[in-house]
Image (cartoon, grey):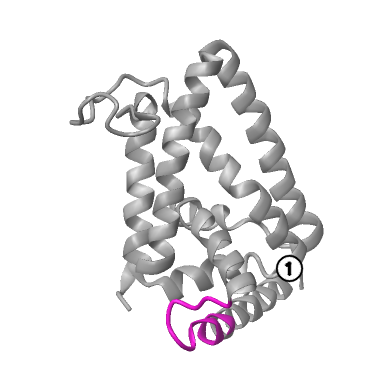
Amino acid sequence: MAGGIFDLEKQFAFYGAYHNNAINVLIHTIFVWPIFFTALVLGCFTPALGLLPFSPGAFPFQEYMILNLSFVVAVVYALFYIMLDKKAGTLAAALCLLCWVSSNSLAQRLGFSLAWKVVLVSQLVCWIGQFIGHGVFEKRSPALLDNLVQAFMMAPFFVLLEVLQKFCGYEPYPGFQKAVRAKVQVNIKEWRANKQKKSA
């Protein structure tokens, strides 16, 4: 396990403490990746940084592999996830790069005048859904209010790990889920204690 920002156990426990309710987790599983994808769509309208050094037609969908801001964001997320966990991180990285290619495709098809409207509606629906998840079901403010960067960076990977754990029984290493649950419970206990002190 790496320390600091690349400590997966610490990162996952931080995010998990704000997403302990099953319905809230489901809501985030549905909405987090669309937020990431539609943000990339807007990034596709930034100036191109260069061209991929491949001959024309070397890859399928090569015309959508444009090195713009969406590419930079996708690569940063992809590398961060691989650093956190090689196996699940590689899958997450592949999804990030797939989002980059498909967001360029969608941006080219829609054009900016329509794309920003689609992105705005999608973002509003997804964010409203998540705030409902926190306010109605989790009854705790979103993680982004306590650590904006950490919450934004971890969110897509968190929901992916949740899906891999639930349907594949995946653990980055033996005892990971048990250790995370213990940290989550400590965090929630401290939060409830602080909440009671403030309301007293």
Q: Residue 125: percent from the left, percent from the top?
A: 71, 37
Reply yes or no: does residue 73 show up in magenta.
no
The residue range painted magenta reads 169-181
Q: Quadrant of residue 114?
A: top right
Quick one: 190 or 173, which is closer to the camera? 173
What quarter of the picture does the C terminus occupy? bottom right
Is any part of residue 85 visible from this angle? no
Q: Is residue 109 left or right of residue 86?
A: right
Q: Secondary structure at mark 1?
A: loop
Q: Is residue 133 above or below residue 180?
A: above
Q: Residue 191: percent from the left, percent from the top?
A: 64, 73
* Mark 1 Cα shell of 10 Å, populated few (<14), some (14-19), many (≥20): some
Which residue bears the numbered disc 1? 21
Q: Quadrant of residue 89?
A: bottom left
Quick one: 186 or 173, which is closer to the camera? 173
Q: Residue at x 58, y 73 (%)?
A: 168
Q: Residue at x 66, y 54 (%)?
A: 28
Q: Is residue 86 left or right of residue 137?
A: left
Q: Amino acid at mark 1?
A: Asn
Is any part of residue 45 visible from this angle? yes
What quarter of the picture does the N terminus occupy? bottom left
The tally of labels here is 1
Quick one: 140 or 60, which is closer to the camera? 60
Q: Is residue 172 above or below residue 128?
A: below
